[in-house]
Image (cartoon, rainbow, N blue to C red):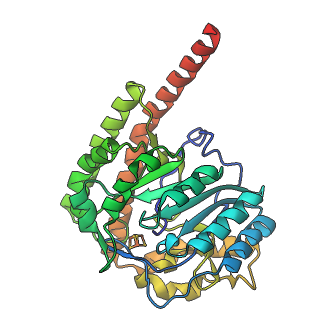
Amino acid sequence: MVGPVHTAQRAPAGALSSPADAPNAPAGAQLILTVTRACNLRCAYCPTAKDGWPSLTVDDARRAVALFAERYGGGDIKLFGGEPLLVPEVVRAAMDEARARPEIRRVYLSTNGLGLDADWIAYVRGHEKAILTLSLDGRPEDHRALRRALPGVADSYAHVVSLLPELTRLPRLVVTQTIAPKTAARAADNFRHLRELGFWRFNFLPGYYVPWRDEQLTALSESFVAIANDIRNSWERGERLYVRNLFTRAPTPFFNTGLVVDADRTIHPSNVGLSGSLEELLDQTQVGTLDDPPTPEALAERAAAVNALLEARLPERVWASTMAADLALTRFCEALYPAYFAQRERRARRRTAAGGAR
Ligand code: SF4
């Protein structure tokens, strides 16, 4: 699973005040570990170049976490792929190292779910810094049409559903619902299905860096309006419902910015080079290796150039589509903020009243 949680929207002052997301570390202070580019799925919208790459080793993972903590001051860690759980021992090493270091605030493990089992779920439950980000796109027919498995690989929808009792009891599980151009018109229905399964923490991800037709963009906007209505109504009824997009922001849609350690141990300020069609940018974004890491200043300087590199490289239609899909997501967030703050105040008042009644 590539980096799934990003939007170019800017969260307004105050929006980042949920305890789970309060940024103790400076903005952008994150380590992105591409532990492997290999994957057992071939999702229709996935840009990641998967073949012909090495994976990080256990030692690489520990070293990267130590480097991030000691040289960059730490912050959040995101474990991405490919599918990270194809190299479970590397993921476990990074998460154990993160747990032991006070400079590390949170560890996000993004997975397509196929590598999860009762042991992994128990490990994540017991890891106080871990947040599991699980990809599930909605009803089985849409999920299966988009998230195609390689021959001989299990059905990821059925596998996740078989683990529902354990998964829905996890306190820090976020479901990423990817919305592709083809499924944009059914996104609200797919969201309702995921809620019916028992999930309540969501991240929405429109397909980025793929062409969208005008009518598909219109369907995306309309679906976001319907999803926002559902969410507002749920909040008014006092139901718990978390929307991670309200607390995230990134300078580059979809891709992640920070200290990026790729599967071949090279270091970049962004993982844009994950994309097969952007692979040639890797030479321009590389600022070091695990053996020869850059200074924080050199990393920041290279980061500032990424959007211009992307825009120059991508076909105009794809860049315009990406910006339009991202704008739809930004508007969705903006439409939700007033209701989010209102429900937060209602909860605070209820807590105060309950405290006074004791
Ligand atoms: S799970 Fe899908 S989106 Fe994630 S890396 Fe594999 S093919 Fe790409």
Percent of width and height locating residue 9: 48, 53
Left or right for 350, reference 194: right
Name, please, the residue furthest toward the front. 118
Percent of width and height locating residue 202: 43, 48
The residue depicted at 54 percent of the width and 66 percent of the height is 256
The residue depicted at 65 percent of the width and 52 percent of the height is 129
Vertical relation: 215 (above or below) 357: below
Q: Nearer the viewer, residue 13 or 344?
A: 344
Vertical relation: 163 (above or below) 116: above
Left or right for 146, reference 168: left
Tell me if residue 212 can be seen.
Answer: no
The residue depicted at 62 percent of the width and 83 percent of the height is 286
Percent of width and height locating residue 109: 55, 61
Name, please, the residue furthest toward the right. 70
Tell me if residue 237 can be seen.
Answer: yes
The residue depicted at 47 percent of the width and 51 percent of the height is 174
Question: Looking at the rendering, in which quadrant would you find the N terminus?
Answer: bottom left
Q: Nearer the viewer, residue 156 or 101?
A: 156
Q: Nearer the viewer, residue 113 or 203?
A: 113
Left or right for 122, reference 29: left
Q: How many marks?
A: 0
Name, please, the residue furthest toward the bottom. 52
Q: Nearer the viewer, residue 112 or 259?
A: 112
Question: Looking at the rendering, in which quadrant would you find the C terminus?
Answer: top right
Quadrant containing ligand 1: bottom left
The answer to which image quadrant residue 275 occupies is bottom left
Percent of width and height locating residue 301: 67, 73
